[in-house]
Amino acid sequence: MSFDSKPFKVTVWQPISSGSRVGVNFRVPKSAVEQPALSLQEQIYSWEPKGVDVWGSIKAVEDMVQVRDLLLEFDPSRPDSDLGLDKFKRAIDRLGETLDSELRTDWTEAEEIIDLNEDGTNFRTNSAAALYNHLKWIHEVFKDVPNASVTVR
Amino acid sequence: MNEFTLISRQQSSGLLADLLLAWSETTLTLAVREDTAFRGNGWLDIGSIILKPGAAEPNTDNRSTLASAIQFGFYEWRCPSEENLSSALFDLTGLSQNDEGKKNDDSKKDQRSKALRSLDALAAAACRVGLIHPIFDPNAVSLMPFRRPTTVVSDTSAIIQGGLDFVVRFLYPMARIKVPAIAHMELLNASDRFLILYRKQSQSAGTVLLDHTMSQGGQRALLRLELQTETEIERGRLGADPLRGVVHPGSDPEDKALGLSVIQRSFADRLIFETARQHVRESSPDHPVSILTCDQGLARMTMAEGMPLLYFDALKFSSMCGRLITGTSFNPFTGKLYAVPLSSLLWELSVTYGAARLTTKGGDSVEIVAMGTDLSWKPHHADDDLLRVRTGKAMPIIRGPSITPQPKRSGRSGQQDHAEGAPKLSRPVGFYRFSLSKMLVLIEQIVEKETIPEAKALELIDSTSKSQIADYGGFLLAGGFIADEAGSFLKAESTDELWRALRMSKLASLGELFQRVPSFSLFIKTIEATEPGEQARIPERSRSAYTSLAEIAGLAMHIPDDRIYRTANNPLPSSFADLAWRAYAELSHGTDEFVLTGAWLEELGRHHGVHPLVARDRLQEARTSGLLERYTEGSTPETRYSRHTLDTLVVSDGVPRVRRIGLYEGDLLLPGKGSVSLKLRKAGQ
């Protein structure tokens, strides 16, 4: 059994405001370099799945590649206009399509071991469904934040 | 359906696993029912549950794998479409457009609206158990997880809609929880309203449904928080909830005129806010206190009063419709997986609506019922999270996590199925853990009394654990040594046969009888396997008991730091003489030196498959026949061999008991004489 060693991290940003807290992470978007008048971005949410290959449950390679490529388009080096939550939703919806049929995803073992009496067994999950549900939650929470952006790496 | 049985949520995983095994299905229909609101015996189908147990681990059986899937959330919940669900609900409640009576009048519209709102309770229940999360305000999420202790004061809506459970699950202990008394009172009022309608069997189906789902779901959330979690809830001194006295009925005519004894919605909101403000005054100046709510009015008032807010949107069922919800999800902050046991979902839905049910395609079902006209309630039900469960099939004799109901069989055909073929521990066979000595006592009493109540059986094995007695019952039932009767150990035809074999130490009969238990039969086949590591597949929980059984029946012997050896060889005296000599020669390196008796017995078991008891008897016969002569020598046994023992059966005053013999102590060949060393000589030498 192997687990994806590539990190997968989703971060939600919003333009920094006068009320921003000290100590939060900042990002200088490409647009800010070109147009310094634009504001810096502050991190408002960050999330990284642990011990799970998030793509491991998608059976068809083409599904996995499509979904991963769509999500990895949210590269931090891209301009803010390419990192909006509307576009993020399209990527999430594509992931959701893989869940329409039971035949397109499967349950896989996670790294975490459940300590069950003397025996241990691996946690299991449909990582595609769990990822979809969580990304959908992220979208629902932050979709109305003005000029919010998402990065995935 | 069978009779109801009270079962705790924690205990239910084993029962559900047993049922799933018996049904041989992992895709089930999930449904809920509200007695008063639903017509006839109708149930509302709210989707399908698909168990995803995966392949059984090498050292576990299918039952354990299924129980793990139930306990650790390895399942999917496919939710139905909104249209189908609302249509089915209207049909069940007599509120469909085509239904006779009250057609299109305002009352019907109101009831339809309430019935639809009651569907949102499905989303609230899913949220409370952690299958989905509340949609918080982004500003609130950006403050999570809390970096320093923060008091969260919950309002009633947050309790019902799952916000409080989210805080407890993901933000505790940094979040300190405070539930104002007024929230309890609001839920109590809602519950009273519902019970009045319930008792008079109100025809206002929508109102009944809505009041039921809100009041019972909310009360369960608070009870679960108090009784089932480690969460500490802050409770102020008496009177610490400001203005609480105002809602008590008083004699002041002005109060009466104001109607303050009736809790007004806005007034209750103000009391919750005042509770939070009181807490601010009592805390250190820099300690943050937030109000948790999904009530927009309270949220606006809180902001206007300058207090931090954790606001979330109450979830609608439409947000779940058509979705695939999984029992394992990601923690929204740490990214780790966490599990929602299937039983948590079933228990929550059952309390929220009154009853929940899982059904197979073939019509087998299990109902979990929280409320019914003839069902009583006691505080210990809440303490232990007990609900009433009944099935469409016979329940196992004793309810516990270890019973495996075997398929009904005629004659011995079912057992032969298990006994044939290659050993496969992944088959649906229960492995049991017990003390062999206590098992013998139990069998003796069953033979003598013919029936033993479960309480007495617990006494005999000196235990109070139902799961332990379930193991004893499961083994005896699986072998056909007791009859299938709920709540007691009832003597069966084979009980006497087993007892006779035990009393007479008939090894061959014992071996045959024990192997009627499918898991023991698999155990024997597994130890016969020659592949290294095959024995690692034997479940640890049964290894000790099954090894003892095999040893007393002459089927196997365990050699410490080596393995368990199958001892199926029962040679004729002449053949034995040859095997015995070869084993001796191997150990003595061809000399006529004494060798350790224990080492010789183990050599015979290890390389020639001869059990020590058989070796003892055949050696005696070989001596009598003049084939071999043996000489023994006593000395102090070496302590390093103290673990090399063999369980044997001794009969004293007609009662069989287990006796553990040290193989290197020399007692086996010549009882009472410490023949630690042995020398053999062939006839004519």
Image (cartoon, coloured by chain):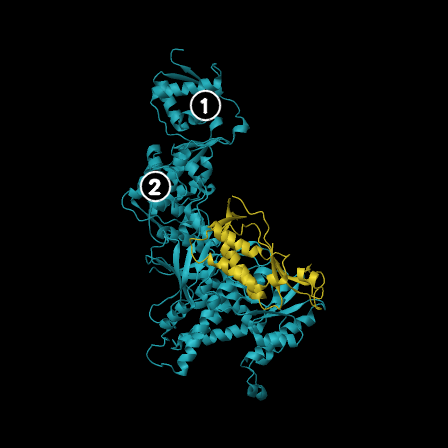
Chain colours: A yellow, B cyan
- Residue lying at the far front of the rendered structure: A34
- Residue B161's place in the image compared with B481, above or below, is below
Query: Could you tell me residue B628's position as x and y percent?
Result: 39, 17
Quarter of the image with the N terminus of chain B is: bottom left
| Label 1 sits on residue | B600
Inspect the image, locate mark 1, and give the three-letter code of the amino acid beneath it.
Trp
Q: How many marks?
A: 2
Q: Is residue A92 above or below residue B268?
A: above
Quarter residue A27 falls in: bottom right
Q: Are marks 2 and 1 in contact (CB under 8 Å)?
A: no
Earlier residue among tags 2 and 1: 2
Dividing the picture into quadrants, the one containing residue B515 is top left
- The amino acid pointed to by label 2 is His
Front residue of B132 and A71: A71
Q: Is residue B225 left or right of residue B655?
A: right
At x 38%, y 77%, the residue is B203
* Subunit ID for the residue under disc 1: B
Numbered circle sitting on residue B418: 2
Q: In this orientation, which residue lies closer to the viewer: B572 or A97?
A: A97
Q: Position of residue A58 (x, y in %)?
A: 48, 52
The numbered mark at residue B157 is: none
Q: Residues within 10 Å of mark 2 (few under 14, many from 20)?
A: many
Subunit of label 2 = B
Q: Residue at x 64, y 72 (%)?
A: B276
| Circle 2 SS class | helix
Task: Give the quarter of the figure containing the C terminus of chain B.
Answer: top left
